[in-house]
Image (cartoon, rainbow, N blue to C red):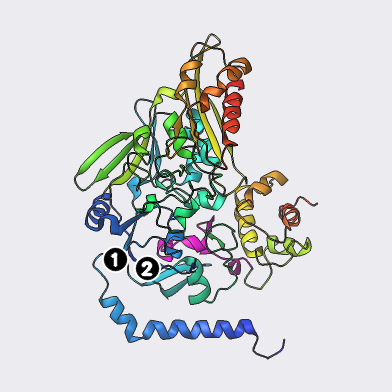
Amino acid sequence: MTSYDVMPATELYQPVNIEDATALAARLGRKGWLLGGGQDTYGWLKDRAKRPDAFIDLTGIDVLKGIRSLPDGGVEIGSMTTITEVAQNPLINEKFTLLSAAAKTVASPQIRNMGTLGGNLCQDTRCWYYRRGLNCYRAGGNICYADSPEGMNREHALFGASRCVAVTPSDTAPALVALEATMLITSASGSRQVAAEDFFVGPATDILNMTALQADEILVSVRIPRKWADATFYHEKVADRNVWDFALVSLCAAFKEDAGQITDARLVAGGVDCVPHRLREVEQAIIGQPRNETTGEAVKVRATSAATTLNYNQFKVPLMQNLVLRALRG
Amino acid sequence: MSTRLSRRRFIKSVIASGVAASATSGWYSAAQANRPAGTTERLISLNINGRTRRVDVLPQETLASTLRYKLGMTGTKIGCNRGECGACTVLIDDVTHYSCSMLTHSVRGRSVTTVEGLQAADGTLHPIQQAFIDELAPQCGYCTPGQIMAAVALLKDNPKPTRDEVRVGLSGNLCRCGAYDHYLSAVLRASGQST
């Protein structure tokens, strides 16, 4: 399929305040394209796989940038904050190292300098059939090329598939679900808050979109509550290459322990489901257990008890189990 | 030096005359008049290597295209044009960016440094450029401008990096010849840590 070096003619709006941006988003709807760092955008246009009429560049809006501490001891991160800032910020490195560890594994240094947290959360899936502009379910058609007898689906889903078997590419999304973050969303008609777990939607809910954002809505910021600030964290991302690559499987885990026993835990996997995948069975099974190898060996199979493998992604089952084991081994 | 018209000089002269022509054409003014309300101006000023350059930029134009095809600054290479190789790396306010994957309009008011802006006014090479030569770091040389820019940004942040820190610092730049080890040695040499 042909691809081009230049993008087709597209208008560019560069609002400097949030009201102008929401008015533009409301007016343009799906013909407008919200632009953060643009790292998930320009390829779509260069390949002619998606053709918005206009970009709405959000990076000039100062209130969408920066990291602030909240009165309750949590942290608020503006959606246009770069991934590098998230990875290096002292507040996040002090309280929520799970997020900074995940941010450090995003793509390459330059992409982290340009890419924003909002963009990393709202990016589209990397299924190559979809990316190439094929008319699959996710693009509004009625076939899944990846889940076909000859489909190349080594990177695709173990869980939550419904016609589409694509997975979430985001490294920061599982960390924010584990930390029970809240997304602040605004539009010309008002604001709302959505829990991180509900912000990401699977194909059974909405096959055309990866998030709960409507066409006229803008992600303003992410709030992380204090709840997990004193927890111990484990993060690991497994990918074919250490730089640029998306996770085959990643695991973000947070544990609260008391007197040698786990009192509360959140384990969230990336790269195995269209949304960050919570390992609820594992979370429940380890309450009251010590955090060690024995517990890990005993519960790791629960991580994949609901997995449905495709032709080429069976390797993700032991991979996920071993990540759970390593998280519990500590 | 030979007075023969080299390929590089020919291409640069074509680019320079093209800019002059498009900036004064009737087509340009017509496009400007028909611009939808609120969208961006096309004729903008950019701060590149400390100089102000007036350029006519399309709304969807990437910085790499502007540098190479409007301003004739062909030191910045386009490899993959998808943010996957690093050959187009430039510094925006001293931070590395892939110029193929950013809109030129997003760098208004910011300072852009390309590989052409590194040498001193008298033509003396930047210490990192000299170290790359001394270590015979490049093989084919296509990724070298990007590697140099990544190294400049790294040494500004961290003047005495370890070999592993250099490896991370240059990890956003691919080299298909596989000259990575030479690049690492060159950056260490430039930082005064002789290899």
Residue that numbered label 1 is attached to: B39
| Number of numbered discs | 2
Judged left or right of residue A329, residue A72 is left
Q: Which residue is farthest front?
A: A149
Judged left or right of residue B104, residue A316 is right
Residue that numbered label 2 is attached to: B59
**Residue in the picture at 24% in, 51% down:** A19
Give residue A190's quadrant in the image: top left
- The answer to whether marks 2 and 1 mark residues whose Cβ atoms lie closer than 8 Å is yes
Q: Nearer the viewer, residue B51 or B66?
A: B66
N-terminal of the pair, mark 2 or mark 1, is 1
Is residue B107 shown in magenta?
A: yes
Query: The numbered mark 1 sits on a residue in which chain?
Result: B
Q: Which residue is farthest left?
A: A189
Instruction: Give, as a single range, the part of the protein colored magenta.
Output: B92-119
| Mark 2 residue type | Pro
Q: Nearer the viewer, residue A201 or A204?
A: A204
Please tell me how crowded label 2 is: few (under 14), some (14-19), or many (20+) other residues with Cα within 10 Å.
Answer: many
Residue A304 drawn above or below residue A124: above
**Residue in the picture at 65% in, 86% down:** B6
Secondary structure of residue under mark 2: loop
